[in-house]
Amino acid sequence: MNQSMNLPNDRRLPLANTAVAYAAFLIGTLCGLLQVFIRNDALTLPGWLDYYQILTAHGLLLAIVFTTFFIFAFFQAGTSKALGQFGPRVILWNWIGFWITLLGTLLIVVMVVSGQASVLYTFYAPLQAHGLFYVGLALFVIGTWVQGFALIGHYVKWRRANKGQLSPLFAFMTVATIILWVIACLGVVATVLFQFIPWAFGWTDGINVELSRSLFWYFGHPLVYFWLLPAYMAWYIVVPKLIGGKVFSDSLARLSFVLFILFSIPVGFHHQLTEPGIASFWKFLQTVLTFMVIIPSLMTAFSLFATFETRGRQLGGKGLFGWITKLPWKDVRFTSILIAMLFFIPGGAGGIINASFQMNELVHNTLWVVGHFHITVGTPVAMTFFGLTFWFIPYLTGRQFTKNLQRLAFLQIFTWSIGMLLMSTAQHMLGLLGAPRRTAYTGYAHEDALAWFEGVLSNHVTMAVGGSILFLSALLLIYIVIQLWWFAPVSDQENKMTFPMAESDVSGTPALLENWKVWIGIAFVLIALAYTIPLSEIIQHAPPGSGRFQTW
Ligand code: HAS
């Protein structure tokens, strides 16, 4: 098995993906900074730029572009380490996929920057963007599929050469995440190809709005697990290695990923609980299934606590909590991810509130939801990616993560945590008090209600302070990335970064867990149960299609 990546292409591929990810990160966070000031009525944009344009760019660049490119970088470097170097075909297809994804990204960015696609990342009809925006989206998805299938090809080759063996955990989890992604994208591909593109180019007169939203959310919820699962891979595999421990249970880890394939897709209606046109029964069914998809996260939390406690006690930790002090807090690669995990405790709890049918009435379309996604994707996922970046770029470039850069990295994760704590707390509280989301500054509420927004935490100013700290933290991260890429001293044999992968004992793991046909089959049965009847009702009882709206 290959322990180091000698082939330059095995290095260049993930580096190219990481480069796009961080370029998107820089612009995306700048858009975020502008937003908090506009919502605060402290900034007026010039006439050629508007709030919704920036909001669209912010969502797309951070939630879609930064995450996806970083995830593929991580998958590529990790699978080539776990399964051996890529052959020329795998490399070629990965590059083809990368360029298609990038082409799609550029098309999307050009449309948004030129003011022809201020439709937010959810691109809800009947808002209509330029047709090329949707073509960009389609290319983006196709590119990721090509990269994904190239990785699966590498995995299949390994399995053929190692008949009867379970694959290494990293490869297993990569394949599970790609399967989830491909099944999830079927919804967005269907709506983009068959609804949005013909409508935007004027080949059809109207669009079935409810159908397009339902197909979007069929994709939109598993999308969040496409972000989360690579972070979980770091939590299950990288972190135990960093602390000198092992994967707590190989079968538990694999089972949790299988459960995500089963339950993350037939749940999209929990984003549409307030929408008419879907019978309550189907909403209720999907809400129940949403509670099923919480289980693998609870299993993950259990497994991580067990890993930490076992290792802490091995190192001499005594008493109920003494083991916590034995963890390697001075290693920023560990501490960053640990803080990311801590953020996910309230983040996940907020998700459970959102998913509770009646409570959703209170929080839907308020800033609460914005708070929720900043402490799910915006910190647990993003900060895990930061924590990975600190060793991942040196691993690829062969440079050192010097002591000075480590100190800066601590500053970066602390500022991110403080900024996020302020901003997301303000967002949650403002949301509970009724502050809407997806809107620029609004002074239209009753003055009594506006007074509620003048608390210490329930305040747009607090949100803006948090947002500004986050932007400074983002700049610091970009500085660290540049240093690790070009300027840090080159490592010698002694301080060379390796890809940390913890040992995982497969001796008790049932082979059934790696029988993808079974899991994909069950996933489709659940999807059919949850979606066939409501979608056919939405199609059969559709009102006349809606015309185009461009409100910007
Ligand atoms: Fe969510 C809306 C429900 C998880 C992202 N979510 C959103 C949106 C985004 C998003 C972006 O049901 C907005 C979409 C839009 O634009 O409209 N969400 C859930 C549920 C979960 C959940 C039930 N969401 C996520 C994750 C996201 C994400 C993950 C991104 C990565 N969400 C909803 C609902 C809505 C929603 C509704 C619609 C709201 C509306 O009305 O519009 C669950 O998956 C959460 C389960 C998680 C847990 C936490 C487990 C904790 C762990 C950490 C352990 C810590 C350790 C530390 C070990 C149960 C694993 C140890 C420490 C030591 C010191 C030792």
Image (spheres, helix red, strand yellow):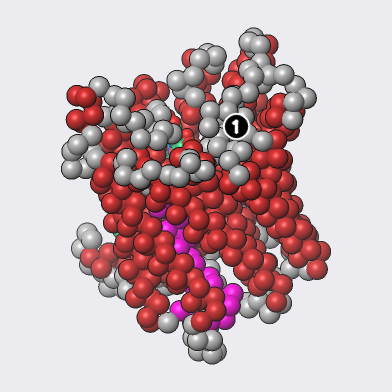
Indicate the quadrant where residue 384 lies: bottom left
Indicate the quadrant where residue 457 lies: top left
Task: Please say if 532 is above or below 443.
Answer: above
Residue shown at 18% from the left, 43% from the top = 456
Judged from this view, the residue extending furthest toward the right is 89
Magenta segment boundaries in residue numbering = 376-401
Which residue in the protein does label 1 denote?
Answer: 216
- The picture places residue 216, in percent across and down from the top left corner, at 60, 32
Whether residue 380 appears in magenta in the rendering, the answer is yes
- The picture places residue 412, in percent across and down from the top left corner, at 36, 66
Can residue 387 be seen in the rendering of this structure?
no
Residue in the foreground of this view, choosing between 549 and 375: 549
Mark 1 nearby-residue class (10 Å; few <14, some 14–19, many ≥20): many
Residue shown at 48% from the left, 28% from the top = 270
Number of numbered discs visible in the structure rendering: 1
Indicate the quadrant where residue 108 lies: top right
Residue in the foreground of this view, choosing between 246 and 455: 455
Judged from this view, the residue extending furthest toward the front is 47
Quadrant into which the N terminus falls: bottom right
Q: Main secondary structure of the magenta part?
A: helix
- The picture places residue 439, in percent across and down from the top left corner, at 41, 33
- The picture places residue 57, in percent across and down from the top left corner, at 53, 46
Whether residue 477 appears in magenta in the rendering, the answer is no
- Quadrant of picture, ligand 1: top left
Q: In the rendered structure, which amino acid carries the disc numbered 1?
A: Phe
Residue shown at 60% from the left, 38% from the top = 117
